[in-house]
């Protein structure tokens, strides 16, 4: 009889602990706004509503960010698996899941940079910044790349990076900044890089000349 009482006491204690844990899990901290709404000229009732919307947006953005990180990791691992099998079915696989090629390979670029610099903000930078980051990471420090990723305008930061600039004047055109070329004898890779830069400058020149011709026709 005494043994049964002890068992019942233990069971009751276990139930209380379970209920306590359940209560703790159900406690959700109150959301605190991150915006000073006194600058927005809103009524109190409007502020209450907009804070509700703000909470939804912030929580959804956090969830979306985590989902993108997880999705990128899953795609990268799947790509490795298909590459090892050498059957070329990776694209067929992700398209069967309803994913588009451009979206997948952009996410894989982000994942590559994320693994290298360990910064989740890489999943938020504009898509057109990604190839630029891959280029400049060969010539700047990892800390500089991270600074660019964390900046509010990463594309502007990328454009500002140079090893010294000079301004040249072209007849019948706007001024254009061209990066000084540092002459380094390091083989074919450097030659290819310089050729690509030269082609890019010619393209810019053609764009300027085209814009000028359009403007002249309108005069």
Image (tube, helix red, strand yellow):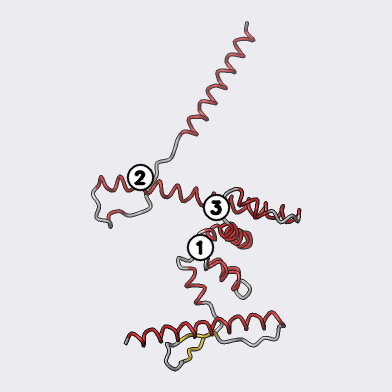
Tell me which residue sits at (47%, 72%) in the image.
Answer: 156
Camera-side residue: 16 or 212?
A: 212
Kindly state the secondary structure of the residue where label 2 is placed: helix
Left or right: where does residue 61 sit relative to residue 183?
left
Residue 49 sits in quarter: top left
Q: Quadrant of the C terminus?
A: bottom left
**Residue 30 horizontal/vertical position (percent):** 40, 41
Tag 2 and tag 1, C-beta contact below 8 Å: no
On screen, residue 54 above or below 159? above
Left or right: where does residue 211 sit relative to residue 91?
left
Q: CA distance from mark 2 to mark 3?
A: 24 Å
Q: Can you tell which mark lies on residue 52?
A: 2
Kindly state the secondary structure of the residue where label 3 is placed: helix
Left or right: where does residue 152 sit relative to residue 108?
left
Label 3, residues with CA under 10 Å away: few <14, some 14-19, many ≥20: some
Q: CA distance from mark 3 to mark 1?
A: 13 Å
Q: Circle 3 is placed at which residue position?
A: 68
Camera-side residue: 130 or 99?
A: 99
Camera-side residue: 217 or 74?
A: 217
Q: Can you tell which mark lies on residue 125?
A: 1
Tell me which residue sits at (50%, 64%) in the image.
Answer: 126
Q: In the rendered structure, which disc, 3 or 1, sits on the residue that comes first in sequence?
A: 3
Tell me which residue sits at (44%, 94%) in the image.
Answer: 171
Label 2, residues with CA under 10 Å away: few <14, some 14-19, many ≥20: few
């Amino acid at each position: 009889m005494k043994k049964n009482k002890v068992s019942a006491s233990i069971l009751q204690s276990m139930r209380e602990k379970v209920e306590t844990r359940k209560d703790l899990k159900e406690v959700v901290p109150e959301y605190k706004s991150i915006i000073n709404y006194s600058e927005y000229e809103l009524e109190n009732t409007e502020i209450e509503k907009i804070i509700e919307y703000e909470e939804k947006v912030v929580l959804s953005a956090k969830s979306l960010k985590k989902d993108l990180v997880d999705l990128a990791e899953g795609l990268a691992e799947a790509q490795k698996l298909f590459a090892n099998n050498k059957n070329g079915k990776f694209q067929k696989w992700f398209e069967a899941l309803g994913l588009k090629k451009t979206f997948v390979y952009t996410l894989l670029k982000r994942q590559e940079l994320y693994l290298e610099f360990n910064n989740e903000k890489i999943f938020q930078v504009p898509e057109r910044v990604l190839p630029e980051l891959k280029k400049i990471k060969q010539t700047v420090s990892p800390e500089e790349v991270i600074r660019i990723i964390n900046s509010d305008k990463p594309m502007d930061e990328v454009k500002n990076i140079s090893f010294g600039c000079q301004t040249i004047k072209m007849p019948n055109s706007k001024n254009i900044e061209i990066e000084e070329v540092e002459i380094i004898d390091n083989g074919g890779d450097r030659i290819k890089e310089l050729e690509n830069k030269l082609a890019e400058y010619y393209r810019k020149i053609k764009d300027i000349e085209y814009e000028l011709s359009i403007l002249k026709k309108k005069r």
